[in-house]
Image (spheres, rainbow, N blue to C red):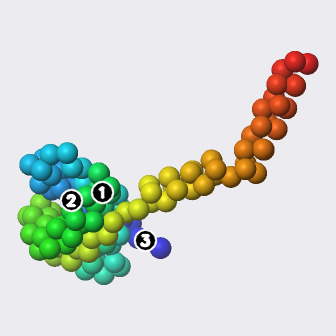
Amino acid sequence: MEGKRQAKIARLLQKELSEIFRRQTAALGNTLVSVSAVRVSPDLSIAKVYLSIFPPAKAQGILENIKRQSKTCRYELAQAVKSTLRKCPDLSFYLDDSLDYVENIDRLLASDPVSQRAEAQAEETTEAQAEE
């Protein structure tokens, strides 16, 4: 369970990292990097940063570049939060694939013949009730 302090610091880190990535990706053009979530360890020494990258075709390459530049990102983050945090946590970056997961489930449900039959039956029932 995440404590109040952990949640507060996670929100602060997410906000500041989002701003850092917005500034850095503005020069690239046609690329969007957003910080989906930040999870902070209980001792506040490690932060796991989940990134959502658009376009997805470039995601792996951009993530590798961000991982190589993690020290620079940590330095910029430390400068932004120095009045709030005494020590900036180490950053670990991960690709957030939750949107791809949701899209895959929607696609599977759309192709499922059982769910299509259930939808057709529901429509028939609605039409029958409307006629009455």
Three-letter code, disc 3: Glu
Task: Estimate the x, y position of residue 59 in percent, counting from the top left.
Answer: 28, 60
Q: Residue at x 35, y 79 (%)?
A: 42
Q: Residues within 10 Å of mark 3 (few under 14, many from 20)?
A: few
Q: Residues within 10 Å of mark 2 (few under 14, many from 20)?
A: many
SS state under label 2: helix
Q: Nearer the viewer, mark 3 or mark 2?
A: 2
Task: Indicate the quadrant containing the C terminus: top left, top right, bottom left or bottom right.
Answer: top right
Vertical comparison of 126 with 15: above or below:
above
Vertical comparison of 23 with 92: above or below:
above
Left or right: 12 with respect to 107? left
Q: In front: 51, or 119?
A: 119
- Picture quarter containing residue 100? bottom left
Q: Which residue is mark 1?
A: 57
Q: Residue at x 23, y 74 (%)?
A: 91
Instruction: Identify the mark nearer the N-term, 1 or 3.
Output: 3
Q: In front: 107, or 80?
A: 107
Q: Which residue is mark 3?
A: 2
- Picture quarter containing residue 84? bottom left
Instruction: Identify the mark nearer the N-term, 1 or 2.
Output: 2
Three-letter code, disc 1: Ala
Q: Which residue is mark 2?
A: 17
Task: Estimate the x, y position of residue 10 in percent, counting from the top left.
Answer: 31, 64
Instruction: Identify the mark nearer the N-term, 3 or 2.
Output: 3
Three-letter code, disc 2: Leu
SS state under label 3: loop
